[in-house]
């Protein structure tokens, strides 16, 4: 601790406060890093908050990480954190509060994620998920996305039939006859 204060003093006297800040960030001494940033290089305080937030993400403390990302005026980093973790309710809430211009995009991504996992969504979500895999020429994944639609998730029989028809159509166009038959029979 004593040596870090000496090093900080040397960095400040050499007019290199950023070096002192980086030293403290490396030690995860957040209060000290922030104190130096606030006093000698206010623009670096955002970097301290972001570094601290990333450490909190690594420790599984996402709520605290969100707060730190917001202190750094980086709500998009908090959104990415939640999206990467598949924490869609938190991502939607954050977008609603801090990134309203991204709300529609996040909502669609949430629905598509649910459709791909077969855990919910609407007809359009299952169709969109399958079409995304088709665009990437991932035929089996596209078919799987379509077949994730089940009667307990899609109540309208016509909508369900339309989704399943996409699976059959994709199978006919891109799979061998045997594999296509398996899709149709299942």
Image (tube, rainbow, N blue to C red):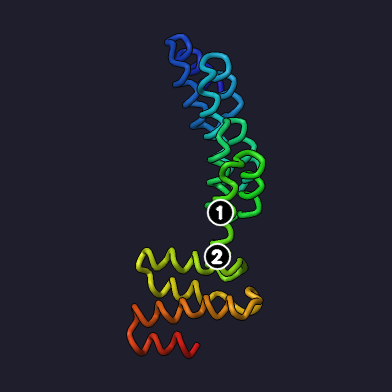
Name the residue at the front extreme. Answer: 158
- Mark seen at residue 125: 2
The residue positioned 46% from the left and 13% from the top of the image is 10
Location of residue 67 in the rendering, given as x and y in whole percent from the top left corner: 64, 37
Check the picture and name the quadrant holding the N terminus. top right
Label 2 residue SS: helix
Q: Residues within 10 Å of mark 2 (few under 14, many from 20)?
A: many
**Disc assigned to residue 85:** 1
Q: Pick whichever, 141 or 69, lies toward us.
A: 141
Residue 135 at x, y percent in the picture: 38, 64
Kindly identify the residue that appears in the image at 55 percent across and 80 percent down: 161
Q: Is residue 65 visible?
A: no
* Residue nearest the observer in this picture, 152 or 32: 152
Say whether residue 88 is left or right of residue 178: right
Please determine whether, in this image, residue 96 is positioned above or below residue 11: below
In-front residue for pair 42/123: 123
The reply, left or right, for residue 152 in relation to residue 33 is right
In the rendered image, is residue 169 in sight? Answer: yes
Q: Which disc number belongs to residue 134?
A: none
For label 1, count other residues whose C-alpha is less than 10 Å away and answer few (under 14), some (14-19) or many (20+). Answer: few
- Residue 93 in percent (x, y) is at 66, 47
Mark nearer the viewer, 1 or 2:
2
Residue under the point 55% across and 65% down: 125
Distance from the alpha carbon under mark 1 to that under mark 2: 20 Å
Total marks drawn?
2
Q: Tell me which residue sits at (61%, 26%) in the image.
A: 31
Secondary structure beneath dot 1 equals: loop
User: Is 41 or 109 nearer to us in this picture?
Assistant: 109
The image shows residue 162, relative to residue 114, as above or below, that is below
- For marks 1 and 2, the one nearer the N-term is 1
């Amino acid at each position: 601790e004593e040596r870090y204060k000496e090093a900080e003093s040397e960095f400040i006297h050499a007019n290199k406060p950023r070096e002192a800040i980086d030293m403290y960030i490396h030690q995860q001494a957040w209060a000290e890093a922030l104190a130096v940033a606030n006093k000698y290089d206010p623009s670096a305080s955002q970097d301290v908050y972001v570094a601290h937030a990333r450490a909190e993400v690594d420790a599984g403390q996402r709520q605290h990480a969100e707060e730190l990302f917001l202190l750094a005026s980086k709500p998009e980093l908090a959104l990415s954190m939640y999206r990467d973790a598949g924490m869609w309710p938190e991502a939607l809430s954050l977008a609603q509060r801090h990134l309203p211009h991204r709300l529609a995009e996040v909502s669609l991504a949430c629905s598509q994620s649910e459709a791909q996992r077969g855990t919910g969504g609407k007809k359009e979500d299952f169709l969109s998920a399958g079409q995304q895999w088709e665009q990437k020429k991932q035929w089996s994944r596209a078919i799987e996305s379509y077949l994730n639609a089940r009667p307990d998730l899609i109540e309208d029989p016509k909508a369900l039939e339309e989704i399943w028809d996409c699976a059959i159509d994709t199978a006919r166009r891109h799979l061998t006859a045997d594999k296509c038959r398996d899709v149709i029979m299942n």
